[in-house]
Image (tube, rainbow, N blue to C red):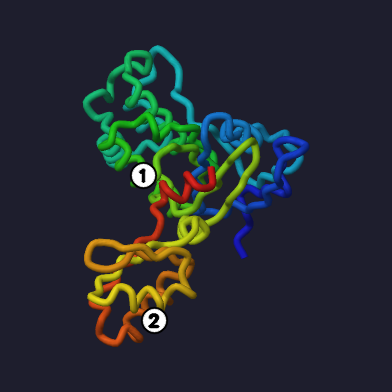
Amino acid sequence: MTEPLLALDGLRLSPEGRQLSLELAPGDAYAVVGRRGAGVHAFLEAVADGRHGSVVTAAKVTVARPPTGRRTTPQSIAVGARGENDEAATQLLALGLWDERQTPTGQLGPSAAHALALLAAVNGDAHVLVLDHTLDALDPWALDGALGIIAAERGRGRAFLVATVRPSVVEALGAVIVMAAGSPVFAGSVEDLVRSAGPVELVVETDEAEAVRQMVEPFCLEARPAKGGLLLRAENGQALAARLLMEGYGSVKTVVLRAPTVAEALARLG
């Protein structure tokens, strides 16, 4: 069994708050989300400062920050650590820093500065990387490249905690910690997050809406008219869809399922 890089053993951010126990293994990545004041920054600080008794680390943890120094440039950061020019060029292109590779750090714009913070972190020696909204400040094309770099570093055994407000980042990482009122209210896979968010919607095309309504009402939360049939809300949408198609006696033509989106699931928890 792989040794965790970092373990949270009943981490509690306030005396009244909920506890969180979690292991971060090589290759793991969690998005950390929450509204303003939800405790996202406090959570990241507790993990990164190394002094919280409930945080056990077996590897170096670093927070991504733009490097300083008048002579520091994206090129020097990309080449300096690994000394591999080909990989350095790949990273600079992916993060949209190629044209600014010789630009001193103090002259970079906001997106480039945050891209450089990620570049410095992945070219450092830490195995657990904490990104405090670093990805949120990136331009769209740089974000895609950053996610690719993170995926490659996960393949090398690194782990990530990424504070973000972007549902697309949550989906890309595949796991999430949701903070609310200073406490973690969810920690797990995105799939489980969506499943926990509540009922799915089913749009049923039928010429006999009333008959279908009577058949499914015991198994759904809501049934109301919709164009061409019914709109249903149900906890177990797949089972209800199967029932409709098998027992609809030909009156049910189509059933379309729509699960909550990641953004909707996060909103319901936060």
User: Foreground mark, 1 or 2?
Assistant: 2
Q: Where residue 54 sits: x, y (%)?
A: 74, 43
Q: Where, by quadrant of the figure, is residue 18 drawn?
A: top right
In the image, 235 versus 33, the foreground residue is: 235
Disc nearer the start of the sequence (1/2): 1
Q: Image point 40% across, 44% down: which residue?
A: 167
Residue type of the residue flagged with mark 1: Leu
Q: In the drawing, does residue 140 fall left or right of residue 43?
A: left
User: Residue under circle 1?
Assistant: 147
The 10 Å Cα crowd at callout 1, few under 14, some 14 to 19, many 20 or more, is: some
Q: Where residue 31 sits: x, y (%)?
A: 49, 45
Q: Image point 63% across, 48% down: which residue?
A: 6
258 vs 123: above or below: below
Identify the disc placed on residue 191. none
Q: Image point 46% across, 34% down: which residue?
A: 121
Can residue 177 be seen in this snapshot?
Answer: yes
Residue type of the residue flagged with mark 2: Arg
Can residue 127 be seen in this snapshot?
Answer: no
Count of marks, rendered view: 2
SS category of the residue bearing label 2: helix
Q: Where residue 134 sits: x, y (%)?
A: 43, 32
Q: Where residue 236 sits: x, y (%)?
A: 46, 70
Q: Residue furthest front?
A: 210
SS category of the residue bearing label 1: helix
Q: In the drawing, does residue 23 fall left or right of residue 145?
A: right
In the image, 86 versus 242, the foreground residue is: 242
Quadrant showing the N terminus: bottom right
Identify the disc placed on residue 243. 2
